[in-house]
Image (cartoon, rainbow, N blue to C red):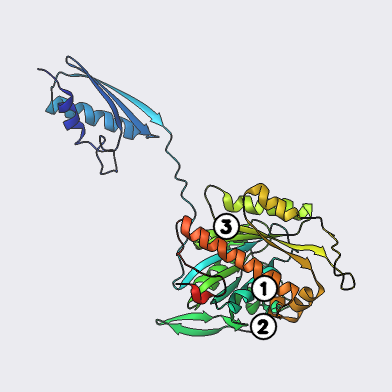
Amino acid sequence: MKITKQAIFDVLKEISLPGEGQNIIDRGVVTNVMIFGDQVDIDLQLENPSLQARKKLEVTILRSIHQEVYEKAKININIKVVAAKKQLNPIKGKSIPGIENIIAISSGKGGVGKSTITSNIAVTLAQMGCKVGVLDADIYGPSIPTMFDIEGSKPLSVKIDGKSKMQPIENYGVKILSIGFFTKPEQAVIWRGPMAAKALNQMIFDASWGELDFLLIDLPPGTGDIHLSIVQALPLSGALVVSTPQNVALSDAKKGISMFQQENIKVPVLGVVENMSYFTPEELPENKYYIFGKKGAEYLAKDKGVPFLGSVPIIQSVREASDYGRPASLQEKTTISDKFNQITKNLVSQVIFRNKNLPPTKAVEITNLVGCEAIK
């Protein structure tokens, strides 16, 4: 009897790997079949099979060919074992209905003014006509309530579609949630990572954020559990990194950028903001003193291939405004409000570019940067 390749393929198409529905031909297990008279050589490629599964497959092939093709066929089965391919899917979470863009604001090092930048960008976006929310994810050192003059506030519970949700506290046109609302001012939050992540998820998904153009997430310093929880829980539109020009801060900021750019995270870095860039005394308005170094964050952005969004000088009123709970960008037509206005416009430009060129959280179109009434 003459054995044909087609006859062998027809038999192999009826055989599946243990526990799988797809046959070994379509599954790509069979890599080669050779016929030499009554001799059949079959090459197989398997991903880390157990010895039992391998033997069972060999017996099934031998029996099927002997029964259905030729009972005296001499069959050689050669099995090559390969490592299973690792699936490096980007870490993405579920979206929050009604929220267009979610931006994480990060710093590698503490004390560089990340929360100050967050609060001022949020207020500037609100002044532009955007619907804005801020999630204070700095579990161990929440400062957003102080900066928005809402310390001691307690979110109310509201019913949404029959479910109880937290109602964010609102001030200056910005909706805010923070772990600081649920602890006493002098109370230290002493939680392990899983407990902190659980609290964070409740503030994200058990809150009534409503319709927002932007949700800004004020992350804690560093690259730890909270950062991983955020990128797992939410489909971030992008990240903004804050640093001073000092080498110590830049070293940590570089790690923060690298974290977002990792293969299994891949969150677009929308840009770098340099805080405390220089100091100008009131009596010498033309002088600039680069106390922490000059243009360090700008050079870092260029080195890492990410946009530089702007710099903020050391101005006493910025510190005072944060302490008093009235962000400095609320001041009209001042040097600092102009700075934050330009930084915010640059950030929105990067969001537009990101949404046009990368897979969406949800695409937006801002035709001019004067206000979010232009978002369609």
Q: Residue at x 66, y 76 (%)?
A: 180
Earlier residue among tags 1 and 3: 1
Answer left or right for 80 relative to 316: left
Residue 244 placement (x, y as % from top left): 75, 59
| Label 1 – label 3 distance at C-alpha | 25 Å
Q: Quadrant of the C terminus?
A: bottom left
| Disc 1 versus disc 3: nearer the observer | 1
Foreground: 47 or 147?
Answer: 147
The quadrant in which residue 195 appears is bottom right
The quadrant in which residue 196 appears is bottom right
Answer left or right for 52 relative to 86: left
Residue 77 placement (x, y as % from top left): 28, 23
Foreground: 45 or 216?
Answer: 216
Residue marked by disc 2: 150
CB of mark 1 within 8 Å of CB of mark 3?
A: no
Residue type pointed to by label 2: Ile
Residue marked by disc 3: 228
The answer to whether residue 244 is seen in the rendering is yes
The quadrant in which residue 169 appears is bottom right
Residue type pointed to by label 1: Asn
Neighbours of disc 1 within 10 Å: few (<14), some (14-19), many (20+) = many
Residue 147 placement (x, y as % from top left): 70, 77
Please tell me whether mark 3 sits on a helix, a strand or a loop: helix
| Label 1 – label 2 distance at C-alpha | 15 Å
| Label 2 – label 3 distance at C-alpha | 28 Å
Q: Residue at x 56, y 70 (%)?
A: 369
Please tell me whether residue 144 is drawn above or below residue 26 in the rendered image: below
Residue marked by disc 1: 120
Earlier residue among tags 2 and 3: 2
| Disc 1 versus disc 2: nearer the observer | 1
Residue type pointed to by label 3: Leu
Please tell me whether residue 125 is drawn above or below residue 271 in the rendered image: below
